[in-house]
Image (cartoon, grey):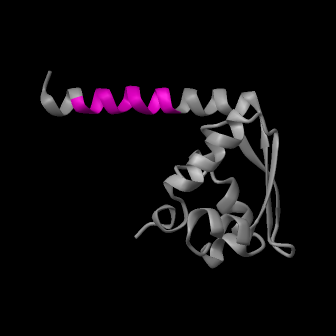
Amino acid sequence: MAISDILFSRAFKKYFKESARRGESELQLSFSDIERIIGKKIPSLGKTKGAGETFWNDVSDISGQWREFGYSVSKFDHERGVVRFEKSVAVEEDFREVRKIQNESFKEELKDLSGK
């Protein structure tokens, strides 16, 4: 099972969607807040210095949970157990552009596989 399967859920994505809809520009969540939202424990990798910073800032499907709605991680504090997310139009636009490129690439791969 992938870390993204363990950590992130539809509930977490919904949390960011609702926060963006309400116009919240900054979200500070404790590890316990995040675990309450997702209904699971955060893997230890996401709580440690160094590895945790990489984990929360990685531009991947994991960070897509918040990047899709324009949030990026502005602070990770492993000692206090806090992750701060800030809203940025640039992040949201960047996320959409990356998804567009991924979709176009996927369509090309399907075309190649089908021989058309």
Q: Nearer the viewer, residue 71 or 102?
A: 71
x 60%, y 75%: residue: 41
Question: Relative to 84, is 11 on the left or the right?
Answer: left
Q: Inspect this view and state whether residue 82 appears.
A: yes
Residue 68, position as x, y percentages in the image: 60, 38
Residue at image position (47%, 28%) is 101
Q: Quadrant of residue 69?
A: top right
Q: Quadrant of the N terminus?
A: bottom left
Please, is residue 50 above or below residue 109 in the view?
below
Which secondary structure class fits the magenta region best? helix
Is 15 on the left or on the right of 74, as rendered? left
Residue 6 appears at what percent x and percent y? 49, 68
Left-right relation of 105 to 47: left
**What residue lies at 60% left-to-right and 34% top-to-bottom?**
95
Looking at the picture, how far across and down is residue 94, in whole percent?
A: 64, 30
Examine the rendered structure and indicate whether residue 10 appears above or below residue 110: below
Q: Which residue is at the far left?
A: 115
**Rendered image quadrant of residue 84:** bottom right
Say left or right for 77 vs 61. right
State whether residue 59 appears in this view.
no
Span highlighted in magenta in the image: 99-110
For the C terminus, give its image quadrant: top left
